[in-house]
Image (cartoon, grey):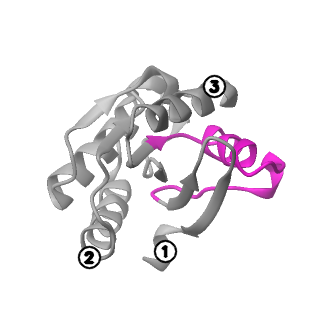
Amino acid sequence: MLVYLVRHATAQDRTLGVPDPSRHLVEKGIKQTLKLADFCKRQLQAPQLLLTSPLVRAEQTAVVLHQHTHWPEPQKQAWLIIDTLPEIQHKALIDLLKQGVESVCCIGHEPDISTLLALLLNSEAEHFFIKKASITALELTPDQAVLLWSLPVALL
């Protein structure tokens, strides 16, 4: 299964007093997401599923991708929320694979994406840091994952 892991774009600063689940994308984040969407539209085949954390900033990232790429309607998934154990996220991806899903894009948060990536690649989380609005591609089988590429939004 082809897996795209996307970190949400830049959101409101934590120090503004907005509850974490409600933090919105700022103008910079919207521009980042549009740049990501342009890359995805030009270079990638649409995934079968577009899954997102239910937190506002991730959902907004997913909606912009959907609207500007014609990728599938985003579906909120609790297992993509912050601080979910990577083993739970891994199991969710394997379940999708067993259901016959051939490609999926998952929009989530740091450090969760890096931790999941490390688990999938049998590595250490400190070896990875996914920047905001960046995308990583993997090929996932029941037995292993292979890193295909990872691009920060600045290079898109």
Q: What element carries label 2?
A: helix
Q: Do the residues labelled 2 and 3 touch (CB within 8 Å)?
A: no
Residue 42: numbered disc: 2
Q: In which quarter of the image is residue 148?
A: bottom right
The amino acid type, in three-letter code, at marker 3 is: Asp
Residue at x 74% of width, y 48% of height: 118
- The residue tagged 3 is 83
Residue at x 40% of width, y 31% of height: 99
Residue 154: numbered disc: 1
Residue at x 51% of width, y 55% of height: 132
Q: As drawn, is 7 to the left or to the right of 61?
A: right
Q: Is mark 1 on a helix, strand or loop?
A: helix
Q: Are marks 1 and 2 in contact (CB under 8 Å)?
A: no
Q: Position of residue 7 (x, y in %)?
A: 50, 49
Of badges 2 and 3, the one in the foreground is 2
Of badges 1 and 2, the one in the foreground is 2
Q: As drawn, is 78 to the left or to the right of 91?
A: left
Q: Position of residue 55 (x, y in %)?
A: 40, 28
Q: How far apart are marks 1 and 2 (CA)?
A: 16 Å
The amino acid type, in three-letter code, at marker 1 is: Ala
In this view, the residue in front, 90 or 25, is 90
In this view, the residue in front, 60 or 13, is 60
